Image (cartoon, rainbow, N blue to C red):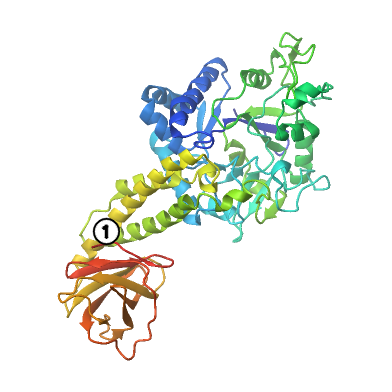
Amino acid sequence: MKAPDITKAPTLYVVPYAHLDTQWRWEMPQTISEYLLKTMRVNFDYIDKYPHYVFNWTGSNRYRMMKEYFPDDYAKLTQYVTAGRWYPAGSSVEEGDVNLPSAEGIFRQILYGNEYYRKDFGKASAEYMLPDCFGFPASLPSILAHAGVKGFSTQKLSAAWQPAPQIGGPDSPEQTPEGIPFNVGLWIGPDGKSVIAALNPGGYGSSAYTDLSKDPGSPPLQPQLTSEQKAKLTPGQLRALGRPQEWEQDWVKRIDLDGHVTGVFADYHYVGTGDVGGAARESTAKLLEAIVTKSETVLPPPPRAFGQQDQPGSTPEGPTVRVGDGPVHVVEATADQMFNDIKPDMTTRMPQYKGDLELINHSAGSLTSQAYHKRMILRNEQLADAAEKASVAAAWMGGRPYPQQRLNDAWTLELAGHFHDLAAGTATPRAYQYSWNDDNIAANQFAGVLTSATESIASGMDTQGKGTALVVYNPLDIAREDVVEATVAFPGGMPKAARVVGPDGKEAPAQVEDGKVLFLAQAPSVGYAVYHLLPADKPATASSLNAAARGTCGAKDAVCVLFVLAVAAPIPIIE
């Protein structure tokens, strides 16, 4: 649907969506067998029934699994994408955590996510959708902007999770809830780059009950719960019951305020369902169809509080009313339509925010949980970087073809592990058995590529000289000096001391410790250096090295290749 001139005509972009936690209180088998299939088939039904319905769904990893396990349904999905009725949204492999991974990890989410969309559907998204991530760093808008992403949306900055920034509130220009700087505005990164952000779209499980183009009027009086009804509620439900509930946003008032503050009379609204995939209630899909076609319909009954029964007189057999003819133009939109419709010259008056959008309450205790998975995410990023750089050098030297597909497959597993409940540490114990398996498969693939590439490069280097040649690889983008170590099978057994001669012919500080030789090595940026190891009767008097053993690199042949990651100990690669 095409929007009117949003600098003049009040417009609400309604984004139908279904949130799926790929693993959370359930594991991958249930996601595949139940939630993926349900999401496709319920939305296929809506698309066939309601001509203007468009469904938005994120995560190329989910699409990959749908294609593998349900090829016939996936073929139908592809037809709906071509027709513009199903939109591959989010620009990412998964709705991932953005606090743990490095900037490179987030760049790769966008690269691999949108590349999958382009390959399978011939289109890509211009927005980054993270409705349920547990807070957002100040660097995110810069990363997104440099990756070519125009817009960002989330519904996570609600009072329930206590956003950390002291912003928003009833006295703010757009009278946003506390913790939300604006409804739609510019989120600016530390380098001045920015994205248009929709930070108050309503919950991803929102439904439509009234004509969104008009003032919703006063909500009906809610009956009081009995003691018996309250006894059945959880503590969280009781707290929610005690808070004033706005059962329908007054979009006429809100968009008018938006427009007078920013010059852009547009806002962004999620409707859908949460956590287990699927789709919005059919009553919402039906009402939206009536609104956008300005036709007559029966309004759905208003929502109920926890434990309440249907209200008298609010059944679906109510009166027929005409909808969609109010002052707000309602568009059933793809997730990036509003961000594309807001042109650069329209942003000059938009509110701006620069800084973190983190949460105090949500997931605070999980930030140190599931440390093995967190460690593997970071370690695999380092392994992948080292493997890719070495593979470029090996291909340039004519030693090995660049293993693009193998690296792509490993990165897909690595990025799938970023999913916000997995990386943050809030999924079930069994879910981590699946993620650990993928972590280690990815690590083995990256390490295998690195081993192959470094062997190829070492075979083309001049390693002639006395003793055992040791080739040290530094994958960092800066020259580096650090301690490396090797376990070498000396012909006469492990000597009392060792001499290590560097590429400049000078001895490097070295020592023998617990059957290993440790020495101080220097290597150029993304480069290699050859050292030679010889047995000695006593340590060199000039040596000032005093280090504890931390890892091994066996050398059964004449040449041993070692590489050093960005932090801490050298990592063994070749024996």
Q: Nearer the viewer, residue 290 or 566?
A: 566
Residue lying at 69% horizontally and 51% vertically, measured from the top left: 348
- Residue at the left extreme, as displayed: 491
Q: Nearer the viewer, residue 163 or 401?
A: 163
The residue to which callout 1 is attached is: 451
Looking at the rendered image, the quarter that the N terminus falls into is top right
Q: Find residue 550 and report its horizontal and vertical position in percent.
A: 37, 68
Looking at the rendered image, the quarter that the C terminus falls into is bottom left
Residue lying at 51% horizontally and 39% vertically, measured from the top left: 428
Q: Find residue 310 and report its horizontal and vertical position in percent.
A: 75, 15
Q: Is residue 240 left or right of residue 338?
A: right
User: Is residue 213 something one can see in this rendering?
Assistant: no
User: Where, by quadrant of the figure, is residue 458 drawn?
Assistant: bottom left
Q: Nearer the viewer, residue 353 or 544?
A: 544
How many labels, in total? Answer: 1
Q: Is residue 37 left or right of residue 441?
A: right
Q: Is residue 561 left or right of residue 26?
A: left
Q: Is residue 545 left or right of residue 237?
A: left
Q: Find residue 55 and report its horizontal and vertical position in percent.
A: 55, 28
Residue type, label 1: Thr
Residue lying at 72% horizontally and 53% vertically, measured from the top left: 165
User: Where, by quadrant of the figure, is residue 385 drawn?
Assistant: bottom left
The residue carrying pointer 1 sits among few (fewer than 14), some (14 to 19) or many (20 or more) residues within 10 Å by Cα, namely many
Up/down of 465 relative to 423, above or below: below
User: Where, by quadrant of the figure, is residue 567 drawn?
Assistant: bottom left
Q: Find residue 423 and report its horizontal and vertical position in percent.
A: 51, 47
| Secondary element type, mark 1 | helix
Up/down of 545 relative to 558, above or below: below
User: Is residue 150 something one can see in this rendering?
Assistant: yes
